[in-house]
Structure formats: C-alpha cells, structure tokens
Amino acid sequence: MQQYRDIGFIVLLFMLTSCGYHLVGRGERFNEIQAVAVSLFSNKTAERELERELTNALREEFLTDGRVKLVSQRDADAILTGTIDSYTLKPLIFDSVDRVLQYRLEIAVSIKVEDRLRQKAFLNQSLKLSQEYSLSGRVAGDESARKEALKIVSRKLAQQITTLLIEGF
C-alpha cells in the first residue's frame, strides 16, 4: 500500500511540475523595445510642477534600471506619454478640535506607450497610487512632509510604469 502511495505522490509531483504554469512576463511586443523616450507628462490638475516631478522620477527609474535605454524621440523604439488625471489630498486623522493630523496623497495617471515607427500602441494603462503622511503642526514641516509623500508616490509610479513596460505585467 505504501508503495502505491509513493508512486502516486511521485506522479502527482511530476504532473504539478510539468503542468505548463509559468509567469506571464515580457511578451514578444515588449522584446522589440530597446530604447524609450519619455515625454513630459501633461497635467490635468491644479497642482503646479507635478508633471515635472513625475516625469523626472520616471526618467530616473529608466536610467537606474538600465534594461531599456532612455533616448530622444528620434532614436526611440517606443515613446511613452502620460497624463496626470488627478491629484487629491484626503484628510485621514483629526485631533479633538478637528485639525487634520494625517493626509493621504493620491495621484492617478494614464500612460500610453507607442511604437514610434508603426505608430501602434503597446500599452494603454491607468494607474493610481497613494502615500500617507503626518502633519507636524508647523507650516514648513507640513509642506516638507507633503513634498516627501509626493516624491514617494512619484517613485512608486515610476517603478510600476517601468515594470509594465519592461516586464509586460
């Protein structure tokens, strides 16, 4: 009886390891992208300089990652464009006299990656990320905390976008 159980276990292991499961990653269309140009994001929000913060974070991420070269539009296989659709600050925690102690900063973007030569979209995606931050009660400190939260969200968005383009998921 033990012998049949062992054989059954071995057969089950074999079936599980050969079932064809694999991570879906960089598809054929993404293999063609060796160099990308990142255009300055457009900004539909009232928050000034947000487009520069996010575009710079994305360019820095491509340079740091190194798997796809960051180049000018004329040298690119693909052109990445994006729009900042929303920027919101949501109060999360209040003190006993209803002063805000903590905010959640949220940014939503839409990105498009287009084959420069074929003028065909590789990727059309919307993303939304957030970061919470606490207030210190000092105006300068509160603004610094907001800016730091914005940098964190920008880096996270840049990492997600880079992963989407390079790895295909």
Image (spheres, grey):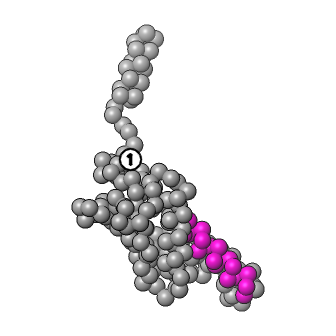
Which of the pair 21/52 is nearer the observer? 52
Which image quadrant for residue 8? top left
Which residue lies at the image location 33% right of the left edge and 51% below the top edge? Answer: 32
Q: Residue at x 46, y 60 (%)?
A: 70
Residue at (30%, 47%) from the top-left corner? Answer: 28
Position above or below: 31 against 10: below
- Residue 105 image offset from top left, x and y in percent: 56, 76
Q: Tell me, yes or no, whether the highlighted magenta stretch contains residue 155.
A: yes
Q: Is residue 159 left or right of residue 15?
A: right
* Residue 56 percent across, percent down from the top left: 53, 70
Above or below, 85 relative to 153: below
Q: Is residue 142 left or right of residue 35?
A: right
- Going by the numbered disc 1, the residue's amino acid type is Gly
Residue beneath the point at 42% across and 79% down: 42
Quadrant including the N terminus:
top left
The image shows residue 159 at horizontal and vertical percentages of 51, 60
Q: Which residues are magenta?
A: 139-157
Residue 146 shows in the view: yes
Label 1 environment density (alpha carbons within 10 Å; few <14, some 14–19, many ≥20): few
Looking at this view, is 28 or 102 the one in front? 28
Placement of 77 over or under 1, stated as above or below: below
Q: Quadrant of residue 4?
A: top left
Q: Secondary structure at mark 1?
A: loop
Which residue does the numbered mark 1 point to in the structure image? Answer: 25
Q: Is residue 123 visible?
A: no
Taking 131 as reference, is 159 above or below it?
above
The rendered magenta stretch, by its main secondary structure, is classed as helix
> Quick one: 144 or 74, which is closer to the camera?
74
* Left or right of 3 in this view: 97: right
> Is residue 22 found inside the magenta-colored segment of the image?
no
Q: Position of residue 21 (x, y in %)?
A: 36, 37
